[in-house]
Amino acid sequence: MKKVVLAADLGGTNLRIAAVDETGQLLRLVKKPIPSEVSPRNLMEQIGEMAEECCLPEVAAKRSFSAVAFTAPAPVAKDFDGVLTKLPNIPSLVGMNLKAELEKLFDLPVTIENDATAAGIGENWIGASKGIENAICVTLGTGIGGGIIVNGEPIRGKDGIGGEVGHICVEPEGFSCGCGSHGCVEQYASATALVRSARDRGMRIETAKDVYDAFKAGNGMADAVFRSMGRHLGIMLAGLVNALNPEMLVICGGVTQGWDAFASHTEAEIRNRAYAVGAERAKLVRGLLGDNAGIIGAARSAFLSMK
Ligand SMILES: [Zn+2]
């Protein structure tokens, strides 16, 4: 019988749960918003209901789940005990032992992975950097996350904050950041940053997509917004290229819809700043798995832990 895990991506606004098989294929995906200020108890109820939907007869008949695999928008160290800390987007869950609660609910082995690290693992398993030993995955969304693979292994660091590339400084006297520092690349290259940058230039827009639409329509101000965004991303990536000498830089997340507006500026900045041999080596590409990268990476970690 083929092994299947129940994998889930716990984000700031949505919970996605899927049955995932050993090849990374999603057999069934259920997605629902998480209420703001959700309590640990209500979250567990919601997880139970959504898991039921993933267990529909066509999935359950041939297979049963071998494990439960979650992502969390929180630091996850190698010896992670399951207690969620530092959750800027869902503070109501701080202090909850997610691992213990999931073990109680499902009576199955549970693995938990940081969300951005999981996206890096997913892309490295069956996505853009498949089969590549040294790859950096950067997720550009509301914030910026990173999943770094070195010699085939994800970097978690001693305290689980390894790969937090969104908080690398690109402007020493720059905007203050939610992490407590200032000038972080998250303040210059995320979707949130695109909107602020456009408004600061006097553009009347609501979303990052509006800025991209303006770019496509030939708006010079929107072009300047993406040029600045792409440069700042490139400054950060040039540092990583020098530090880690990766073979591939995979860019994921909603902001990649504006790829043609910023990627050439990012590449130019990497070439300007990094060691030539490293810049030449590191191929800049878009992720292939879209919103499913995290859930697929979480499942991969669970399958590996069974071996
Ligand atoms: Zn920061």
Image: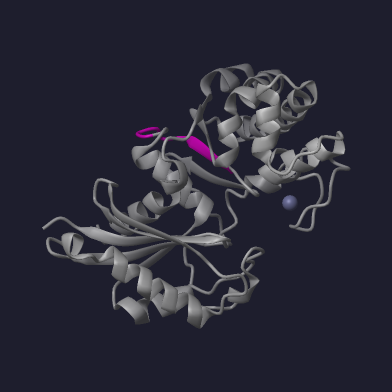
Front position in the image: 287 or 161: 287
Q: Quadrant of residue 16?
A: bottom left
Pinpoint residue 161: horizontal percent, then vertical percent. Answer: 60, 56
Residue 133 at what x, y percent from top left?
A: 41, 35
Left or right, 55 with respect to 124, comes to: left
Residue 123 in picture, x, y percent from top left = 42, 40
Front-lying residue, 279 or 191:
191
Residue drawn where x is 52% and y is 21% of the image? 281
Q: Is residue 298 left or right of residue 97?
A: left
**Residue at 71% across / 46% down in the picture?**
192
**Quarter residue 132 falls in:** top left
Asked if residue 152 shows in the view, the reply is: no
> Is 183 placed above or below 9 here?
above
Q: Is residue 195 above or below residue 181?
A: above
Q: Quadrant of the N terminus?
A: bottom left
Q: How is the image coloured?
A: one colour
How far from the left and from the top, in percent, is residue 167?
70, 48
Q: Is residue 276 visible?
A: yes
The relative height of residue 241 versus residue 177 in the rendered view (above or below) is: above
Residue drawn 55% across the image and 55% down it: 157
Is residue 100 shown above or below 142?
below
Residue numbers of the magenta segment: 130-139
Q: Quadrant of residue 104?
A: bottom left
User: Which residue occupies the foreground of this view, 94 or 150?
Assistant: 94
Q: Quadrant of the C terminus?
A: bottom left
Q: Please say whether residue 65 is one of the residues in the magenta stretch.
A: no
